[in-house]
């Protein structure tokens, strides 16, 4: 339209009787119009470039998170397909996308993209298209090494609204993301602690010296009846007669029948990561013990896994999670802390000066039951102290409340537990778990766009 108006103006001025004025004005008007048209086309080109930059940034982040799952000869293909799915500007032609992956202690992915943009006004000056290009680079692995413990709610309510399925999907993605950041195998280790009222340390530990069996032995077993006869006397018929006594004795079940469940430690060890002392087996019941009490909880979750970089086993554990039981966030958090603590019971590897320790606590409900209480306020008080102790140990704590339909109030406790206000997430859809895990993964791995 502008070009047509320019042509009509020039024609009018060509008919003017004062030819000198017409020619001079036309000469002046042409560059002015050209500059005005150039500004409009340049603004449009910048709009296209901004959309292209956003698509390139998203592509670079996607490649970084999934780089280990892509064969090297398919990186460019994956980059192009993802970029085109994100970049929707039909006025462009000749779109080209390339990606370069550099693997070293400081890994990076660079995405370059370019396209031709059709001009609307510069055609008057013989310029029909403009070439627009952008570059995006993600980098990771340059910061601290990581130990990450996931305390994941496996209670019965997680069966509703696809929460458990969404949690599994999100955790699989987070594991892949963490794996991709490890320049060396031991740079990143992950522990997973499924929890309900109790946690499951694995039945293979039935002989472990750090387990307290006193309550379990009282609750699991059977009566054994024995008859003891001794001495003799003479009855009325003149025959010998023995004196017999029948007694009943409680016999604890074989510890091999234990299902692996552990309940809260004695207070105040329930809010600390104090190493267990095997000699506490000899303490009187009135003295607090550092040992971990076994319990045959009927809704025992699947067994936890300590810090490892066996990604296949971690993924398998996630697949095996199943919802059942009541909510005790504190025991999940306590064992996530144990998972990044050296020594028994979890025997975490040593922590170097450049290593960050992170705990992610996800739950879909408020506390309902622990070893001592079925009162939320009482359980929360114990957990608040535990959270403070975890953060004092220089561990970064993220908390997530999945509250579909706002059934519960927003958890003040989880807000207080998070290391920073922005490290608490209140979710109202199951699908949001994936995006939050992704955001946390980006934050703790320092996966970032580098200009």
Image: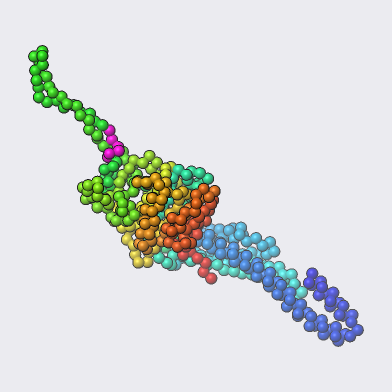
Nearest the eye: 223 or 171:
223
219 within the magenta span: yes
- In percent of width and height, residue 207 lies at 26, 45
- In percent of width and height, residue 168 lies at 47, 49
Colour logic: rainbow
Q: Residue at x 68, y 71 (%)?
A: 43
Nearest the eye: 257 or 368:
368
Q: Residue furthest bottom?
A: 20
- Badge count: 0
302 within the magenta span: no
In this rendering, the answer to whether 353 lies above or below 332 is: below
Q: Residue furthest top?
A: 237
Quarter of the figure with residue 445: bottom left
Q: Residue at x 50, y 55 (%)?
A: 426
Q: What stretch of residues is rendered in magenta?
A: 217-222
Q: Residue at x 65, y 67 (%)?
A: 48
Nearest the eye: 242 or 357:
242
- In percent of width and height, residue 422 lies at 48, 62
Quarter of the figure with residue 42: bottom right
- For the N terminus, the quadrant is bottom right
One can see residue 316 in this view? no
One can see residue 427 in this view? yes
**279 with respect to 41 (left or right):** left
- In percent of width and height, residue 9 lies at 84, 76
**222 with respect to 302 (left or right):** left
Q: Residue at x 70, y 71 (%)?
A: 41
Nearest the eye: 188 or 433:
433
Quarter of the figure with residue 353: bottom left
């Amino acid at each position: 339209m502008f070009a047509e108006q320019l042509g009509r103006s020039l024609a009018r001025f060509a008919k003017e009787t004062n030819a000198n004025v017409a020619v001079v004005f036309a000469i002046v008007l042409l560059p002015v119009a050209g500059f005005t048209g150039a500004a409009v086309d340049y603004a449009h080109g910048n709009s296209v470039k901004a959309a292209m930059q956003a698509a390139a940034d998203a592509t670079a982040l996607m490649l970084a998170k999934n780089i280990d799952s892509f064969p090297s000869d398919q990186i460019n293909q994956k980059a192009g397909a993802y970029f085109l799915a994100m970049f929707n500007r039909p006025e462009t032609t000749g779109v080209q996308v390339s990606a370069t992956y550099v693997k070293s202690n400081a890994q990076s992915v660079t995405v370059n993209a370019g396209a031709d943009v059709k001009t609307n006004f510069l055609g008057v000056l013989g310029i029909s298209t403009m070439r627009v290009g952008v570059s995006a680079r993600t980098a990771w692995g340059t910061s601290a090494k990581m130990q990450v413990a996931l305390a994941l709610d496996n209670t019965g309510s997680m069966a509703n609204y696809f929460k458990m399925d969404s949690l599994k999907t999100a955790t699989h993605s987070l594991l892949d993301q963490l794996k991709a950041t490890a320049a060396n195998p031991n740079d990143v280790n992950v522990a997973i602690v499924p929890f309900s009222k109790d946690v499951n340390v694995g039945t293979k530990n039935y002989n472990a010296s750090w387990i307290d069996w006193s309550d379990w032995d009282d609750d699991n077993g059977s009566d054994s009846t024995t008859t003891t006869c001794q001495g003799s006397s003479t009855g009325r018929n003149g025959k010998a007669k023995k004196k017999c006594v029948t007694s009943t004795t409680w016999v604890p079940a074989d510890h091999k029948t234990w299902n692996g469940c552990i309940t809260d430690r004695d207070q105040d060890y329930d809010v600390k990561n104090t190493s267990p002392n095997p000699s506490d087996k000899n303490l009187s019941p009135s003295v607090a013990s550092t040992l971990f009490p076994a319990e045959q909880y009927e809704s025992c979750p699947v067994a936890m896994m300590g810090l490892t970089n066996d990604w296949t086993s971690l993924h398998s554990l996630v697949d095996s999670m199943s919802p059942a039981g009541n909510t005790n966030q504190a025991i999940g958090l306590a064992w996530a802390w144990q998972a990044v603590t050296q020594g028994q019971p979890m025997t975490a590897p040593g922590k170097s000066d450049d290593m960050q320790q992170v705990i992610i606590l996800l739950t879909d409900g408020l506390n309902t039951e622990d070893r001592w209480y079925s009162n939320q306020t009482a359980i929360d008080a114990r957990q608040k102290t535990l959270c403070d102790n975890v953060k004092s140990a220089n561990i970064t704590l993220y908390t997530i409340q999945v509250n579909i339909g706002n059934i519960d109030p927003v958890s003040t406790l989880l807000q207080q537990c998070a290391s920073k206000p922005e490290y608490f997430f209140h979710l109202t859809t199951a699908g949001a778990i994936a995006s939050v895990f992704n955001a946390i993964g980006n934050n703790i791995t320092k996966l970032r766009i580098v200009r």
